[in-house]
Image (spheres, grey):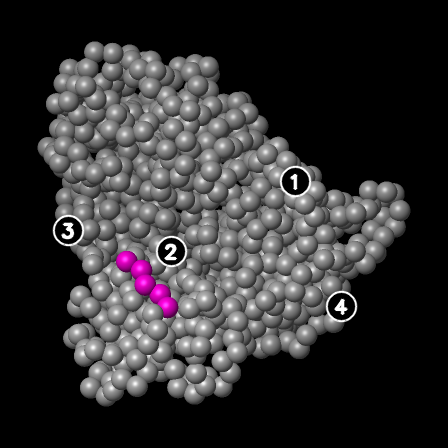
Amino acid sequence: MKRFFLSLGLVAAMLSASAQQRKAPAYPLITHDPYFSIWSFSDHLNAEPTKHWTGTNHALSGLIKVDQQVYSFLGKADKHFEMLLPTAEGKSYTAKYSEKEPAAGWEKTDYNDQSWKAGNAPFGDSDAKTQWKSDNLWMRREFNLDNIDLKGLNLRINHDDNIDLFLNGVKVYSCNCWTGKYVNIPIDEKIKGVLRKGKNVIAAHVKNTAGGQWLDVGLAVEKPAAELKSVLMAKQNNVTINATQTIYQFSAGKVDLELTFTSPLLMDNLDLVARPVSYVSFKLKANDGKKHNAQVYFGASTDIATNNPAQEVEASAYRNGALSVLKAGTTAQPVLKKKGDDIRIDWGYMYVAVAQNSGNQYVTSSANAISSFISGKVAATPAKGNSLTLATVLPFSVGPIATEKTVLIGYDDIESVQYFGENLKPWWNRKNNQTIDKQLTLANNEYASVLQKCDAFNKQYYAANLKVGGKGYADLLDLSYRQAISAHKLVESPQGEILFLSKENFSNGSINTVDITYPSAPLFLVYNPDLLKGMLNGIFYYSESGKWKKPFPAHDIGTYPLANGQTYGEDMPVEEAGNMLILTAAIAKVEGNADYAKKHWKTLSIWADYLSKNGFDPANQLCTDDFAGHLARNTNLSVKAIVALGGYGMLAAQLGEKEAAAKYTPMAKEMAKKWMEMADAGDHYALTFDLKNTWSQKYNLVWDKVLKLGIFPETVYKKEIDFYLKKQNAFGLPLDSRKTYTKSDWILWTATLTDNRADFEKFLKPINKFVLESPSRVPLNDWHETTNGKQVGFQARSVVGGYAIKLLDYQLNKR
């Protein structure tokens, strides 16, 4: 890879501009689903490599050549490594190992390891090739070198837990830690005189201390990058975020560039939401009124199609009707073989397409991509390799009138999720009658109309939120919109039902978690309740199929992307039963009928019965705020159960179930009266029934207000709001009296309990401050510290859809 030259003056100017231009902790660029999701973690698009929401580089790069001067506007060259001794990331290797402590000298080159076992790496638990479940593992890996004059040598390693590692008997790495992922560790200073021509040995001892265990190690060489002093940084003048787009304005000498990333997630059109294609548009205009020749380079790393950059990929070019297309994917294609949280897709194929008459495309190595564009001499196209680049060059004749060209970037995951043993194709190919080429053609042909629809929705969405909550609210909703939708995958179940399956991003990777659905729901209730049904259908099926036999809903149906049954280690009975009842009632309220509830009435009745017996004074258990630990007699969880029973009573009345309505609505109201007595702590209501010197946000009350259930008197809302306003910190209202951290989605729910704009904005203002000042530069994290704005945990989760609760309240109640 190549480094760009920056003058000190330009760096200072950029830093100054950065302070003026920040709009978000991270900026959405390509947003479709939990795997196809690319962000800029910097205020300036050309300051850092673009990344997957997990923080792993998914590099997009952009250069513009104006009258032979080259400027960078997208991405930044990162370190480039070539594998000297591959790890098992791409292809497994064989090494010797022992789980019994060996004799002294086991780490040395001439040690006799014939009595050791041979196994395929990686070594560990879970899906490791060679299972290791004892406390200790000793491993030896032999390899040969012809050249030992190496600079920039790094260990490429993933270990869990504590490790001592030797190269030819010399200790080069030791750490009482675990990595959790593959990392590169420089060892140049420790290997002087250690490497030998011919046979070499890496030896390691790993000790498991708790949790999982793992070992995989190889060697990588960092390739030096020549400085390209001829490349200047384009000046970023502005960035705008709206619901479906992120738009950048640059100046590159005498030409202005408008760069627009559009992911058309318009929820009234599920086929468009599901279409895995984003638009990257380049609009050029002379700023001096004269004509100029210009070329725009757009590069997309094949790392976008890998879980890690060491995996081998294969790339190709072809024509699809009027489109020129580049395609890339791993050679291994392990379809649906991985599950977990900090995981990226390594099956299926990425695509970059452009109208044939608008530009030139080629595949090149990442190390040569930029220099090839600058020189105009394209290196030989590699068919296979690691971290290749799919390059597109667009020529422009630029004048005082803007000219535009567009690149399509798409991803075909072939099979999206496994649902109770059956692999499901993406929604757009649910009938198995589509191809990605057809989707790319549709995206290209419909570009003008799609952009027009996006523009209309962007304006309507912003105006609605501005009216409801003011500018700060409207800006926050624009930022959260694509994140909320793209943390899901849209598929059709074998029963023909819509499934809109969330991934619990940077939490535990669960799929279709009920207490992720609950806070996410408001956005989908406003714009398409069918998508909320798609978030509930899998949970209903799990119970109604007999696969889940408990009298309350499951927490989840698996670990993404394998939805084969709950994998979370503990149930949340009151939490999940309350969530499902409330959200089913909310669907009925929005749609004006209880048809969906009728379909699942028997199941809902079982859950309501459970809550009637166990919900009011909850036993020691987890709620959706499970990070805070177990809590008995949780008054906010009790509120959820009470409101849920009120929602069930409302549904019963709508369905003509008179006996159930006559039982559950009065029951909920009586419980509310008792709750007010037992939770009363003077000027507020306590965190638990038995600890009156505590407090907590009673955010679950919001559904009583939004659904107009009339279970709790409004004096309860008022009493709590008045108390909360005294407890706010610089970056928001703490979750409760135990800690100073908070959840921003719950703050917006709590704020919606206010009865005037001024109080609402008092809760909103610290969240806006968090967005603009948090030192944690990641896609919106919903769990942060109220004293300093730092991320505590979570990022890129769908729960930011819950910010729309104020909009939902207005839509239903016009208040």
On the image, the x and y values in percent for residue 258 come to 70, 45
Task: Tell me the element at label 1.
Answer: helix
CA gap, disc 4 and disc 1: 32 Å
Query: Which one is earlier in the sequence, the residue at label 1 or at label 2?
Result: 1
Q: How many marks?
A: 4
Tell me the residue that label 3 is attached to.
549
Q: Amino acid at mark 2?
A: Asp
Q: Residue at x 35, y 46 (%)?
A: 535
The front one of 631 and 645 is 631
Query: Which one is earlier in the sequence, the residue at label 4 or at label 2?
Result: 2
User: Which quarter shows the N terminus?
Assistant: bottom right
Residue 104, quarter of picture: bottom left
Q: Amino acid at mark 4?
A: Gly
The front one of 506 and 283 is 506
Task: Tell me the element at label 4.
Answer: loop
- Asked if marks 4 and 3 touch (Cβ < 8 Å), the reply is no
Question: Closer to the camera: disc 3 or disc 1?
Answer: 1
Query: Which one is earlier in the sequence, the residue at label 4 or at label 3?
Result: 4
Q: Amino acid at mark 3?
A: Lys
Tell me the residue that label 1 is attached to.
12
Read off the magenta span: 172-176
Residue 342 is labelled as 2
Q: Residue at x 47, y 76 (%)?
A: 84
The front one of 628 and 2 is 2
